[in-house]
Image: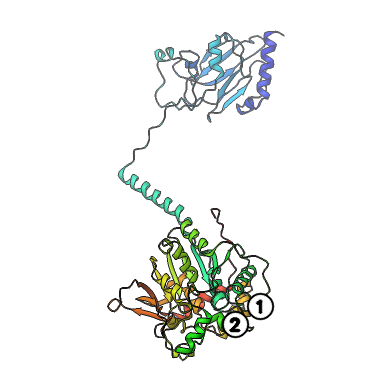
Amino acid sequence: MTTEHKRAAAWRGATKSSAGHRLGVSGPRSASTLRLIADSLGGRSLSSDLKLAHPSGVSTLVAETSPEASGLIALTNRSGHLIDCSALPANSGEIAGRSGSPLTSNLLPFSGISNREHHLLEHPLTYRKQTTAPRSNRELSTNRFRDISLSTLPRKRAFPLTTFSKCVLFALLIFAVVAAASPLAAQEKRKIIIDQDCAGPGGTDTQAILALVQSPDTDVLGITIVTGDAWRDEEVQHALRLLEIIGRTDIPVIPGAIFPLVNSKEYIARWETLYGKVVYQGAWNFAKRHPVHGPFEVPPMPEGAPTTKASTEGIAHFLLRMVHQYPHQVTIYEGGPLTNLALAQAIDPQFASLAKELVLMGGSLNPQTDDPEFTMTPRREFNLWMDPEASRIVLHAPWPRIVVTTVDISLKTKMDKDLISQIGKSQYPAGQYTAKYAEDNYLWDELASVAWLDPSIITKWKKLYLDVSIDHGASYGDTLVWNETTRPHMGEREVEIQDDLDKQKFYKEFVDLLTRPTPPATTHPDH
């Protein structure tokens, strides 16, 4: 094929290519002339890259071919003067448009240039705005070939920051940090262990457990069971079944002490012959819906027997493991006799100090009531009375904080028919369970639970020194209390005692907790 035919074929390929389309190239306009008009190169002189000393810079590329002058290739400058490039033979090349993207095609065959020049012309030319006057002939003649790309373009100088700009940036940084940290803080749940004498079904023990589990703000690490209102083995079954009903079997139930450290049913029977009857003795003289029974009997359960099993971990070991794993983060909620906590404290004297706080339902100071349990013996409260020696150990332990819900404030509350009716409207298992088995009684443990979740329901507090009598005379198990002036300085510790409450706010929050859907399980990957 002759050189003329090769060039004609290359030109036809360029007019049909996508690159040719972008350059506005079409078929021959006449038999004598075919013109290719490229976009302006943004003021960059193509003649400088071709070592053509032309003062005006090149903006338009024109290729003219005809049978008579098939090799003519011309470049025109802005004034329209032609620059003869006919001596250059065919070669493929690339021209960059205004966007910087290379326009590639078999465009304009150039010939007659060296290998080095050929290699350099193959690299894309990127747009660079010319901000100064065209270079002189001397400058153009001494210009060297070089690749022009984004990496070789001069970088713009950073904008200098003023003092005001720095302050604004610092404020934005602080805002970003706070915004990022807030969701994490909001997601942080309050860790708690519920130590409870879980008689059931229904009643103050199970309702206090529900109030704590139903809160979206709590992370219940476990429910530890102690003999109190019922025997331990029966209570364990009620706790397991309760968690099955509400769908929270992820919470472990850990069986604790069956008997007090020193006190016993038999001892109290002898004590009564000297000092009179004790009205309420929990599992020793009281049972729900069935006769009083022994410590290892589990009567038929109205709510159905559980299919899940209790933990086999020792009670003291569990309590100690949790406070060591989460030092100063775990609240110990105590709704029953204090035997389990005394065992943990006796094994490890650091137990109380490693906890965050002790929240206790217990103690009786001067209740204003006609309830026969308290009218003649106002200082006898069951939780502290059942195991007085354990109560003494726990109340003398170095807790960072002790919060006490006493009989005095609990007697101001009531689980009446209206409250039960409100809870019964719930469509969720916790509310349905509560309404089905609820009792008309004081909200003993429930008040301690909800006040821990929201302390603002307590409108009046007082600080006193609290202890329990372990004298085996008439005062055995009674609550002892002093102020700073009268205290005996025998190891008693100051506690925060709730003295009055906003009842309507308490009732509303209690109903809201028990009627809401149960929160999902909290994962503990490090357990």
The percent coordinates of residue 386 (x first, y second) are 49, 78
Tag shown at residue 22? none
In the rendered view, would you say 6 is above or below 504?
above
Q: Camera-side residue: 141 or 505?
A: 505
The answer to whether residue 492 is left or right of residue 314 is: left
Location of the C terminus by quadrant is: bottom right
Which comes sooner in the sequence, label 2 or label 1?
2
Query: Compared to 147, does 384 lie above or below?
Result: below
Q: Amino acid at mark 2?
A: Ala
- Residue 205 figure quarter: bottom right
**Closer-to-camera residue (421/499):** 499
Q: Amino acid at mark 1?
A: Pro
Q: Closer to the camera, 218 or 149?
A: 218
Q: Are marks 2 and 1 in contact (CB under 8 Å)?
A: yes
Identify the secondary structure beneath mark 1.
Answer: loop
Question: Taking the image as drawn, is residue 123 in sight?
Answer: yes
Q: Mark 1 = which residue?
A: 299
In the rendered image, residue 391, in percent from the top left (x then y), is placed at 44, 74
x then y, percent, for residue 259:
53, 74
501 and 109: which is toward the camera: 501
Q: In what element is the residue under mark 2?
A: loop
Residue at the image point whose x is 50% and y is 81% from the top: 267
Check the image and report above or below for 180 versus 371. Answer: above
Q: Which mark is residue 287?
A: 2
Q: Is residue 28 visible?
A: no
Q: Who's the residue at 47% across and 85% down the image?
A: 271
Residue 285 lies left or right of residue 359; in this view the side is right
**The furthest residue to the right:** 1
